[in-house]
Image: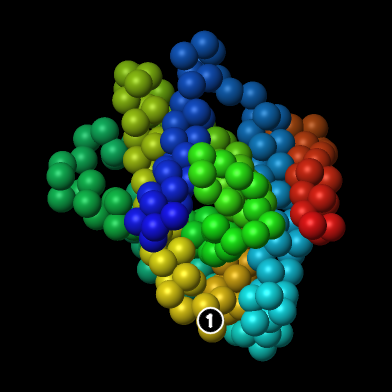
Amino acid sequence: MTLLANLVLVFIAGLITALATGIGALPFFLVKDVNDRWNVGLWGLASGIMVSASVFGLISEGLSSANGGSVIGVVIGMLVGVALVVVSDYIISGTDVNPKKYEQADFKKLILILGVLTVHSFPEGVAIGVSFADLGFQGGYQFAGFVVPLLAIFMTIAISIHNIPEGVAISIPLHSMGVRKWRMVWWSIFSSLPQPIGAVIAFYFVRSARAFLPMGFGFAAGAMIYLVLSEFIPEALEVGEGLPGDGYRELLSGLTLGVLLMLPLAFI
């Protein structure tokens, strides 16, 4: 396949994760409120899958001799990935991206919001792009004429699952404002649109600079693990406040299921 075809496939994978955010608005077509138990469980499931994919997939691939494995490269990449998330959080810490303002924002404000979301969700897009690094090589799964790495499939599913409760979180204030349901779906998807862009950029980089591949895998793994520990799990527990046990049981159940689903990746 040509580079353009590969880039299109990676973009579509990133777009799928963005569209998954819109799923978070769909329950409001049927009910007025979404059960917090399901939200916490989904956060836990996504976290378990992402950490496992990072350890069993990204880090393992970065250490593999087939990719020029380098412990130093992986470690440096992980540190850079963590630093990116920390710096990104610092940059957007004083910026209000409350979805209540999406509906009433003018064009300039929407561009600002999209810029902030780009900084915030870029590591997720990077993880998708890096997971496709071995696209077209042996050992993957045939799909529409492509040889797709198993890691890429798992990572796309993991981030899609993570985006569903994120879409719910975005839709709740919009629903309270009386925003029409299909517009809630659109604004949820809008919040994740930077992911396919980040995926394409990351994929092009790792394919153009194979020598830096271990660092690329480490970067994605470091960013994802830190995001899970610093944002996903704390947000799940915040949603779970008021539940019996403050949501720890639902979170742990989701985490465990996520890890179990990803165990096969450790033996491939």
* Residue in the picture at 15% in, 45% down: 107
Q: Position of residue 52 (x, y in %)?
A: 74, 56
Q: Farthest residue to the top: give it.
A: 30
Looking at the image, is 228 positioned above or below residue 255? Answer: below
Q: Is residue 223 visible?
A: no
Give the residue at mark 1: 212
Picture residue at 44% right of the left edge, 55% below the top: 1
Quadrant in the picture for residue 243: top right
Q: Is residue 265 above or below residue 177?
A: below
Residue 157 location, quadrant? top right
Mark 1 residue element: helix
Q: Quadrant of the C terminus?
A: bottom right
196 up-or-down from 56: above or below: above
The one nearer the camera, 167 or 216, is 216
Residue name at image x 64 percent, y 24 percent: 35
Residue nearest the viewer, comparing 107 with 15: 15
Dot 1 surroundings within 10 Å: few (below 14), some, or many (20 or more)? Answer: many
* x then y, percent, for residue 96: 34, 52
Q: Position of residue 5 (x, y in %)?
A: 39, 52
Q: Residue furthest left?
A: 107
Q: Given the image, on which type of amino acid does mark 1 rest?
A: Phe
Q: Residue furthest bottom?
A: 72
Taking 31 as reference, is 177 above or below it?
below
Tell me where residue 76 appears, x and y as whole percent: 60, 84
Q: Is residue 194 visible?
A: yes
Report the front residue among 209 and 186.
Answer: 209
Q: Is residue 223 left or right of residue 190?
A: right
